[in-house]
Amino acid sequence: MKFMKLGSKPDTFQSDGNNARYVASELATDITVTVGDVKFFLHKFPLLSKSAYLQKLVASGNEENNDEIQISDIPGGPVVFEICAKFCYGMTVTLNAFNVVAARCAAEYLGMHETIEKGNLIYKINVFLNSSIFHSWKDSIIVLQTTKSMLPLSEELKVVGLCIDAIATKACIDVSKVDWSYTYNRRKVPEENGNDLNCNGFRNRPVPKDWWVEDLCELEIDLYKRVIMNIKTKGIISYEVIGEALKAYSYRRLPGFSKGVIRSGDVIKYRSTVDAIVWLLPAEKGSVSCSFLLKLLKAAIIVDLGEMAQEQLVRRIGQQLEEASVNDLSIRAADGEDVVYDVDTVQKIVKEFLMQDQNAEFESEDNEVQEIRRPGILTDASKLMVAKLIDAYLAEIAKDPNLPLSKFVDLAELVSCISRPSHDGLYRAIDMYLKEHPGISKSERKRICKLMDCKKLSVDACMHAVQNERLPLRVVVQVLFFEQVRATASSGSSTPDLPRGLKDLNIGSHGSSRSAATHPEEDWDAVATAEELKALKGEIAALRMSNGIGGSERNGGDSRNSVDKVAISKMKGLLKSKRIFSKIWSSKGAQGENSGSDSSESLGSANPEEAKSTPSRNRRHSVS
């Protein structure tokens, strides 16, 4: 038994060092309450006057044992029970954001309602929550965090819901009225980096619209999801700020997210986080960046989120694909696959992008089928940006020695419908693939080169191509001719015509009647030898020098024409003299007039001699 001095007022509990707590008093204790491994030596009157649960326990106990009670499952354990017991004794009780939820749940457990005594502990705690905690931004967040350890009772008591609503309401308030303490990314503020010696600089800066996003990152995903849903329901915060909040949470809660990976850990935990973020994404286009969406897609693939969520992200990314970079698109293939990159997913994204420009059909009231445009009609600028992006992406994936040609070609053909002024990026990708895959067949080499339009190569790309030992001979010949077309066009000379043999080499033109026995197709699909390219290099260098001189004398017509004639003469002499073009000239008699090549794909007239006698045909086959 424990005693306290007669007439003294207890102000705290004491301990004897053996897990025993008591009130110093001369009155003998008449009840022992065991909570966990701690024994409380107390008095029945103050306890039973405020706790319906303790009244019930004492009344139900037998006469011999009604002064010993054991409580094993009270919320908060011995520490919180002591708070309730102190209140019963009239001692000063200290409540704060960290213990108020536990105290509220313990008071509910003990039945400390107003029906037992007016001004009981439950009432006092509710007043404290409403008058203090819910008026404080940070305290509301702390309290909401503590409710997790008190579930499901904290949910039943509506403490969770009240906290969530209090937080969401404060987040939605006009920023001009925000006057409470909050955390913000001060790295964004110059004065926080030592650039401003004014200590009040940050304090005087206007409150940013996303001032609340970092504080909410402290919440676990289930509570965070409910807060964001509440904020969205109020309809006050813009979708851009909601997107910023989701971005901040992803970077804080998903290790490695900024690099497009998820570090080893609890996959199930990360899966629920990724799933919630995807589910919370605002429907409005542009609410988050394409880069963020792609990082989210990479995370979804890593945690195996599911096809539905991944398809949703693919659809969203496709709508903003022009914003992406090659690094964003570099989605790693799943473990166990031979290839490095997940090209199939990128293909799906590109298809989603292109689908925005398709027509949708609907049936009107008079049963007539009409066409309407989708709301997201693509601009030429966005198409060009995506085409350049995919060209650069192809150059990146081409470095993978295990990448099948079909994946490369299929992706390139998806954007072949997008007209772009230059094919230099595509040429670099093709050249990289040929470099990393030297063992591909002639037909495969021909297939990949058909993706490129030689007329759209820059001067530098042409000069590289005519010296490129990895290209088929037919491509080198075409590049050589179009380089000369450019040279003569820039100096004002008439466009030279190409012999029919070269015309038949135009990639994509298969209507020639030339003899397969005389010109086996595989000869043109084979690569040129080093000696042949070396000879071409010397002639092209001389040709470019001549053209440069002509360009510098644009005010002297005779001099310019003279140089142009020399350049054209060199070109024709090159075509006639080099061994690699001998097949072209030897075939002119056998071909006759029966060429089946489509005029829109033809490159020139049959031969120089024919060009002199039939100028009208020259014009028909000239290069535009």
Image (spheres, rainbow, N blue to C red):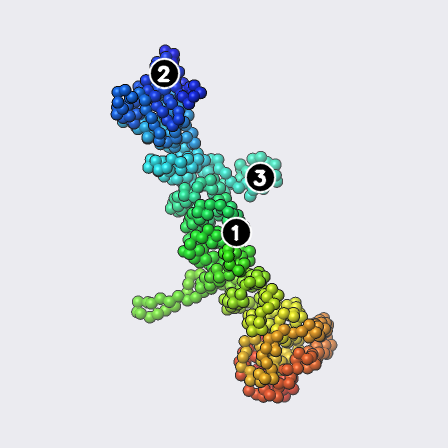
Type of amino acid under label 2: Met
Q: Quadrant of the N terminus?
A: top left
Classify mark 2: residues with Cα within 10 Å, few (<14), some (14-19) or many (20+). Answer: few
What residue is pinned by disc 3?
192
Q: Residue at x 27, y 20 (%)?
A: 64
Label 1: state its secondary structure: loop
Q: Which of pointers 3 and 2 lies earlier in the amino acid sequence?
A: 2
Contact? badges 2 and 1 (CB < 8 Å): no
Per the model, the C-alpha gap separating discs 3 and 1 is: 29 Å
**Residue 574 visible within the image:** yes
Residue 432 at x, y percent in the picture: 60, 64
Question: Mark 2 or mark 1: which is in front?
Answer: 2
Residue 166 at x, y percent in the picture: 39, 38
Type of amino acid under label 3: Glu
Type of amino acid under label 1: Gly
Label 3: state its secondary structure: helix
What residue is pinned by disc 1?
260
Q: Which mark is residue 1?
A: 2
Per the model, the C-alpha gap separating discs 2 and 1 is: 65 Å
Frontmost residue, 398 versus 235: 398
Frontmost residue, 91 versus 618: 91
